[in-house]
Amino acid sequence: MAASPSIVPVAVTAAVVPVLSASSDFSNLREIKKQLLLIAGLTRERGLLHSSKWSAELAFSLPALPLAELQPPPPITEEDAQDMDAYTLAKAYFDVKEYDRAAHFLHGCNSKKAYFLYMYSRYLSGEKKKDDETVDSLGPLEKGQVKNEALRELRVELSKKHQARELDGFGLYLYGVVLRKLDLVKEAIDVFVEATHVLPLHWGAWLELCNLITDKEMLKFLSLPDTWMKEFFLAHIYTELQLIEEALQKYQNLIDVGFSKSSYIVSQIAVAYHNIRDIDKALSIFNELRKQDPYRIENMDTFSNLLYVRSMKSELSYLAHNLCEIDKYRVETCCVIGNYYSLRSQHEKAALYFQRALKLNPRYLGAWTLMGHEYMEMKNTSAAIQAYRHAIEVNKRDYRAWYGLGQTYEILKMPFYCLYYYRRAHQLRPNDSRMLVALGECYEKLNQLVEAKKCYWRAYAVGDVEKMALVKLAKLHEQLTESEQAAQCYIKYIQDIYSCGEIVEHLEESTAFRYLAQYYFKCKLWDEASTCAQKCCAFNDTREEGKALLRQILQLRNQGETPSTEMPAPFFLPASLSANNTPTRRVSPLNLSSVTP
């Protein structure tokens, strides 16, 4: 599948090869720093600015090198010398985004560097024209058929070079990008793997490969080079695949070997905590990162998502104003402002800023998903569906888009569609209780009650975020007249709520106490029924029922009605809930084995 690591094109000069073939361990950080500085320069010369920035930031986190150890620039070949004038002129045009002009002056150049810039200029020219046409004629929500017209020509030319083994690591990277854009995913993966073997230090190739891997099984079958760069790749892909525990372990290992000052690693750890909804930890890390790098814009949209979830209006407002001062026309800035307006319930303005973000970068995943959420708030379901579908086109691993589509079709009362999308979201986030509860509700609507029970119980087992799974399971048992199981669920729900001291919706708490009061009353357990009835009196919606039940219990006691000696009650109330220190019976613990999946 992948090229052997020993196959290194002749085009890479002998002086460069030893430095670019990264070793597999971190024992020599000085050598790693030399490699990073060299690849930062090589990528910058070819206009690969994001890869250059990543390498430079990583190099900056390592100790400075003494003058004697600084790496000299790679030697200039005869071909480089011949193309020097054309390359220098074309690079100047490239830097000011005059891509067609740059390609025109590079036509016919033979050096690898000039040839790459020639092909890359043509590719970017096609992308720019496609984006301009999309924005001008269709708008960000229209699903048009605008294509990069240069892709097929580029594929034919690069394919010939590839077959003749005339492509260096950068050429292979561009060939892979072209194949990916043409939706030739398998071929693109093979080429990117080959690129990582030939030029393991180029982060762009690893990142493109990461975007094409959909699950852990697929990752196992890749023949990747044994290099220290692989550790950064694995940490990144684990984060993308929601394998957060493995990702955090990888990042901790990288910090331990000497990358503790890397802002990239710190931001990735914050994103990982965001993905597992450890909001406090993620906020703490992002705040620390902002102190270290106050002008950083990358990942600040993720930071704004956390502030949004916590309803921290003043902090989100400050972040939005701060990023506006730094660069108001960055995608992340537009998303932060969109989140700010969304938190203020100004959904039209929020959607406008997400649209602005997509004009700047039509493939920015976060903006599509967030815009879908805004259209949902505005009850514009067709636009929401379009936005979520675009998000999935950009990244099929985005569980939020699948979940959003499920919610949209739920509003449209299309449960079979809804079930499909919730299943996809659950596959991506198997331990997220929200996906399981949504699936359970869907199964319930389709009258597949056994499946619904399994989903609700599983949601509780993995850690119910919204504390709703047990209530829904209890109501399902109630509907099926399985009174004992319903009581078990309600009591466990009340125990969980009071043990964590969480403030909950009074409606559900009162529902639980009302059911338990009636259940214990039917079982002739007057003490337990009285305790629950008194609790009902604390809520407006159950106060009258609670008082009526207490009068009935008092009347029965006065008539000499004896409490039941049977103990069908499946659990006991926490002592803190007992009114007037009424003794409660201790019975066997909760048993839901009958509905355990």
Image (cartoon, helix red, strand yellow):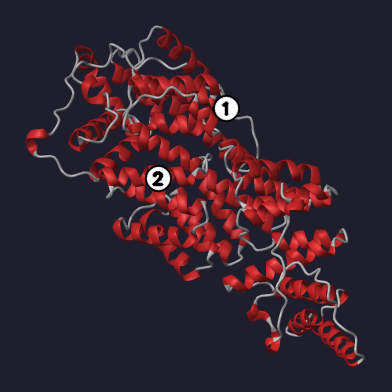
Q: Position of residue 425 (x, y in %)?
A: 64, 44
Q: Mark 2 and mark 1: span between their CA atoms?
A: 41 Å
Let me know if residue 380 appears in the view: no
Q: Position of residue 293 (x, y in %)?
A: 31, 55
Looking at the image, which residue is at 30% across and 20% down?
Answer: 114
Residue 9 tag number? none
Q: Could you tell whether 437 is left or right of 250 in the image?
A: right
Q: Position of residue 35 (x, y in %)?
A: 23, 31
Vertical comparison of 517 with 237: above or below: below
Looking at the image, which residue is at 46% across and 49% down?
Answer: 272
Kind of residue indicated by mark 2: Gln
Mark 1 element type: loop
Q: Could you tell whether 161 is left or right of 185 in the image?
A: left
Q: Nearer the viewer, residue 516 or 191?
A: 516
Q: Nearer the viewer, residue 566 or 372?
A: 566
Q: Could you tell whether 513 is left or right of 199 in the image?
A: right
Quarter of the figure with residue 259: top left
Q: Which residue is mark 2?
A: 249
For mark 1, does the 10 Å Cα neighbourhood hold few (<14), some (14 to 19), or many (20 or more) residues?
Answer: some
Let me know if residue 506 appears in the view: yes
Q: Nearer the viewer, residue 318 or 458?
A: 458
Looking at the image, which residue is at 21% across and 14% down?
Answer: 82
Residue 147 tag number? 1
For mark 2, does the 10 Å Cα neighbourhood hold few (<14), some (14 to 19), or many (20 or more) residues?
Answer: few
Q: Position of residue 540 (x, y in %)?
A: 77, 83
Vertical comparison of 103 with 26: above or below: above
Q: Could you tell whether 284 is left or right of 11 in the image?
A: right
Mark 2 element type: helix
